[in-house]
């Protein structure tokens, strides 16, 4: 970009992760984040306003050469199984409640924690938390892309005041912040999540419409990781006006079925190279029941990666409040491929996105095999499966007899 009229270079649409770094970097506020038909936000530059300063280009973690490699800290990672010894906080968290331990340490030090909360209109926003009650709203995974808004600028101004800051978010958001800042700060701690990808907001809105129609009430909040039946069989719970409640185990909830089928993720999530970009990385320690049954109790186990010396320091600062056990990285990631690699793009992803907007939910779910099986269908599958087993045994038995 050499002249004032040249177009600033941002990430290609297929690679743009929606991190908002360009938006935060623009000194003239020329960038708006605009939804596509699936509800994912992309930057749009008002060229009348643009001075061609290229601050947005320099802040984009996708454009900056080698940014993904530079920000991915997996080579250094040390892996642990961990959980918060405060059972109440652990139960209210998605996995082992380690995020709350890190955040509480920073608050005790007079610092500020940035993370994602669900707003009253059910959008997810990045906001600061300065006390325990604000921290409560950050707890728990929200399965939607959070809007960073001006939080990178806010982080920068807190850092400049010398305040301790913990920024938590998806790996691409942590990479976006680090690229926006462009330099290291001793008072910045970062925590990213193992990230499967983010689902379409339009799909989520359609889900909310169905629930509101079914319950004839307005949804006030959605909690995606309720542990009423345990951590591995987590429930999705929506609360309505008038005290009504919807709840379903994740595998029976049609929004989670669509999310986990990978049919409605942001395009960049299928080729995502942002892995372990924070001082620590947190995820679910899926498979711990098979890998270490002696420590599994279904109340939630975090997969914790310490990726930097600052990450090691954070672990020292939460000592005494956490159960922690070191595990080789290859074991820790055995049942959690998203730690290392992006998910595969389903061939019908674009067709699904088109259909979300134009098909009735029931037809959409049926077309893509996302309908929950009825009891009768479940029975037929079981009988067939067990029937084949019996048939297999019979065949082997007959073969043995014939072989003499
Ligand atoms: C979209 C998404 C996909 C994920 N995919 C996987 C996966 O495939 N495998 C896996 O092991 N773990 C995944 N996780 C992480 C996991 O669900 C837990 O968030 C993580 O284990 C931390 O749990 P915790 O018990 O320590 O704390 P919690 O209190 O449950 O975690 C809350 C933290 O998550 C942040 N957060 C919540 N929602 C969002 C959001 N939408 N965007 C950015 N930050 C958010 C909060 O700011 C806070 O820092 C995913 C999380 C999200 C949000
Ligand atoms: S080139 Fe400068 S003025 Fe133009 S959009 Fe980018 S940051 Fe804003
Ligand atoms: S900075 Fe982030 S939102 Fe902006 S173009 Fe690059 S990837 Fe997309
Ligand atoms: S999968 Fe990658 S691009 Fe998608 S939200 Fe997660 S970190 Fe960002």
Image (cartoon, rainbow, N blue to C red):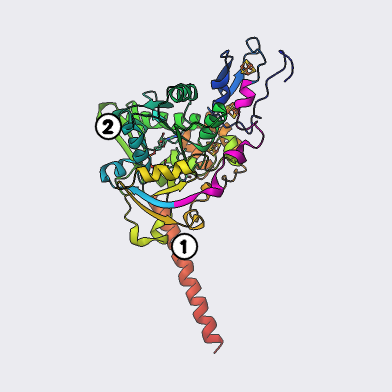
Mark 2 lies on a secondary structure that is loop
Comes first in the chain, label 2 or label 1 = 2
Q: From the top left corner, tell me how far across and down residue 360 is, in percent.
A: 49, 32
- Front label number (2 vs 1): 2
Quarter of the figure that contains the C terminus: bottom right
Q: Is residue 151 above or below residue 264?
A: above
Q: From the top left corner, tell me how far across and down residue 243 is, in percent.
A: 25, 30
Q: From the top left corner, tell me how far across and down residue 373 is, in percent.
A: 43, 49
**Residue 61 lies in the magenta stretch:** yes
Mark 1 lies on a secondary structure that is helix
Query: Left or right: where does residue 390 sit relative to residue 297?
Result: right
Counting the numbered discs, the total is: 2
Q: Which residues are magenta?
A: 55-79
Q: Nearer the viewer, residue 197 or 253?
A: 197
Observer able to see residue 232: no
Give the residue pinned by disc 2: 244
């Amino acid at each position: 970009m050499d002249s004032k009229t040249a177009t600033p270079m941002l990430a290609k649409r297929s690679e743009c992760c929606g991190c908002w770094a360009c938006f935060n970097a623009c000194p003239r506020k020329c960038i708006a984040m605009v939804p596509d038909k699936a509800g994912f936000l992309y930057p749009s530059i008002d060229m009348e306003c643009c001075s061609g300063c290229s601050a947005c280009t320099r802040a984009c973690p996708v454009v900056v050469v080698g940014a993904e490699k530079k920000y991915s800290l997996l080579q250094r990672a040390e892996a642990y199984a961990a959980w918060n010894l405060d059972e109440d906080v652990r139960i209210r968290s998605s996995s082992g409640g380690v995020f709350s331990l890190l955040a509480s340490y920073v608050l005790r030090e007079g610092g500020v924690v940035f993370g994602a909360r669900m707003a009253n209109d059910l959008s997810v926003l990045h906001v600061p938390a300065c006390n325990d009650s604000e921290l409560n709203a950050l707890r728990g995974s929200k399965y939607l892309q959070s809007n960073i808004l001006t939080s990178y600028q806010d982080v920068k101004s807190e850092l400049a005041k010398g305040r301790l800051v913990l920024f938590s978010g998806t790996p691409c958001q942590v990479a976006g912040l680090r690229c926006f800042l462009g330099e290291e700060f001793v008072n910045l701690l970062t925590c990213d999540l193992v990230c499967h990808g983010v689902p379409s907001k339009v799909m989520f809105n359609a889900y909310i419409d169905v629930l509101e129609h079914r319950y004839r009430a307005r949804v006030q909040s959605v909690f995606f990781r309720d542990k009423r039946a345990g951590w591995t069989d987590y429930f999705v719970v929506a609360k309505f006006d008038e005290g009504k409640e919807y709840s379903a185990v994740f595998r029976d909830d049609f929004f989670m079925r669509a999310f986990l089928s990978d049919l409605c993720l942001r395009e960049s999530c299928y080729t995502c190279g942002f892995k372990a970009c924070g001082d620590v990385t947190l995820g679910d320690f899926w498979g711990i029941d098979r890998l270490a049954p002696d420590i599994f109790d279904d109340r939630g186990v975090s997969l914790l990666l310490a990726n930097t010396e600052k990450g090691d320091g954070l672990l020292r600062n939460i000592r005494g409040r956490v159960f922690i056990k070191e595990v080789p990285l290859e074991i820790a990631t055995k049942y959690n491929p998203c730690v290392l690699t992006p998910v595969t793009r389903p061939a019908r992803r674009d067709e699904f996105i088109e259909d979300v907007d134009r098909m009735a939910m029931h037809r959409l779910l049926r077309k893509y095999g996302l309908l929950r099986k009825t009891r009768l269908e479940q029975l037929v599958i079981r009988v067939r499966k067990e029937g084949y087993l019996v048939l297999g045994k019979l065949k082997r038995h007959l073969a043995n007899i014939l072989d003499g």
